[in-house]
């Protein structure tokens, strides 16, 4: 329980910093610092969440991390909705953390749409790299 | 005599999981928050094994492994890296840098302990 609380606090803090970074006005472009921050935050969620009982979080963190790795490699934002979708993803993860992954029908649907959005980026990028 | 383990990870949760698991088994644990921070322990003291994350700020795991291997006292100590990356290329890169093996995150404590026991044998 103690380690789970540390995870919740650590991840919530990281998401709050990320939220502030994503809210900075910069003409629809995401800074390299924010890209790195997204990758690190999602990476930590993916690797740690299941060890403290959050089994559903990696499902959403994985496609986001992968999409941002592609963005980092190409140094471009190739989807105009990226920032908005990432902000929504941050909110969904914050809610799942706060409710111990108790999905409401709304968060479940939001999560499904977000996973699809980031998986689309990953599929497109993987095809481009083929 | 208790074996000394240096664990390096930027995630406090992972550090706590590893620290808790190892201390319960009687290991002495040193903790670094990233590769740069961990270097303060590379002062010639006895370290029996290093467990490090790969993806970290300041100095990442690959950089740390290379630094460790440059120091005579630590040239041959086992180094395990913790990673969520299951791609062969990442493992190969870490092995070439001097890692002994890897543990995929998420892991259960028993898996961590058996990996440590295996390389310390």
Image (cartoon, coloured by chain):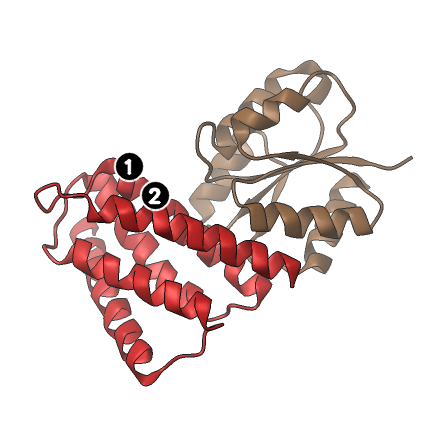
Chain colours: A red, B brown
Residue at left 53%, top 33%?
B34
Foreground pick, A18 / A129: A18
Q: Chain of mark 2?
A: A
Mark 2 and mark 1 residues within 8 Å of each other at the beta carbon: yes
Residue at left 58%, top 62%?
A51
Give the percent coordinates (x, y) of residue A62: 37, 59
Q: Is residue A108 above or below residue B73?
A: below
Q: Residue furthest right?
A: B1
Foreground pick, A32 / B92: A32
Give the percent coordinates (x, y) of residue B88: 46, 47
Question: Which disc, if any, is residue A33?
Answer: 1
The N terminus of chain A is located in which quarter? bottom right
Asked where in the image residue A81 lies, by quadrant, the reply is bottom left
Q: Horizontally, is A103 left or right of B79 in the view?
A: left
Residue at left 37%, top 60%?
A61
Q: Residues within 10 Å of mark 2 (few under 14, many from 20)?
A: many
Q: Residue furthest bottom?
A: A105
Give the residue number, with chain letter if any, for mark 2: A37
Q: Horizontally, is A118 left or right of B90 in the view?
A: left
Same chain? Circles 2 and 1 = yes
């Amino acid at each position: 329980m103690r380690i789970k609380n540390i995870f919740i606090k650590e991840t919530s803090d990281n998401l709050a910093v990320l939220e502030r970074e994503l809210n900075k006005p910069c003409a629809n472009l995401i800074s390299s610092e924010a890209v790195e921050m997204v990758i690190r935050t999602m990476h930590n969620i993916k690797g740690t969440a299941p060890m403290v009982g959050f089994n559903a979080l990696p499902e959403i963190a994985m496609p986001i991390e992968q999409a941002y790795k592609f963005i980092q490699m190409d140094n471009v934002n190739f989807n105009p909705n990226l920032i908005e979708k990432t902000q929504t993803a941050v909110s969904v993860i914050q809610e799942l953390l706060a409710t111990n992954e108790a999905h409401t029908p709304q968060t479940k649907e939001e999560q499904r749409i977000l996973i699809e959005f980031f998986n689309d980026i990953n599929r497109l990028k993987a095809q481009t790299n083929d | 005599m208790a074996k000394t383990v240096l664990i390096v990870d930027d995630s406090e949760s992972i550090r706590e999981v590893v620290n808790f698991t190892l201390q319960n088994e009687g290991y002495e644990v040193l903790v670094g928050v990233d590769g740069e921070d961990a270097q303060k322990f590379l002062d010639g003291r006895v370290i029996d094994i290093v467990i490090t994350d790969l993806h970290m700020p300041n100095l990442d795991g690959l950089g740390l492994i290379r630094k460790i291997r440059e120091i005579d006292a630590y040239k041959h100590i086992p180094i395990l890296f913790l990673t969520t990356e299951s791609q062969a290329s990442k493992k190969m890169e870490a092995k070439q840098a001097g890692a002994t093996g890897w543990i995929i995150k998420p892991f259960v404590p028993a898996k961590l302990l058996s990996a440590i026991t295996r390389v310390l044998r």
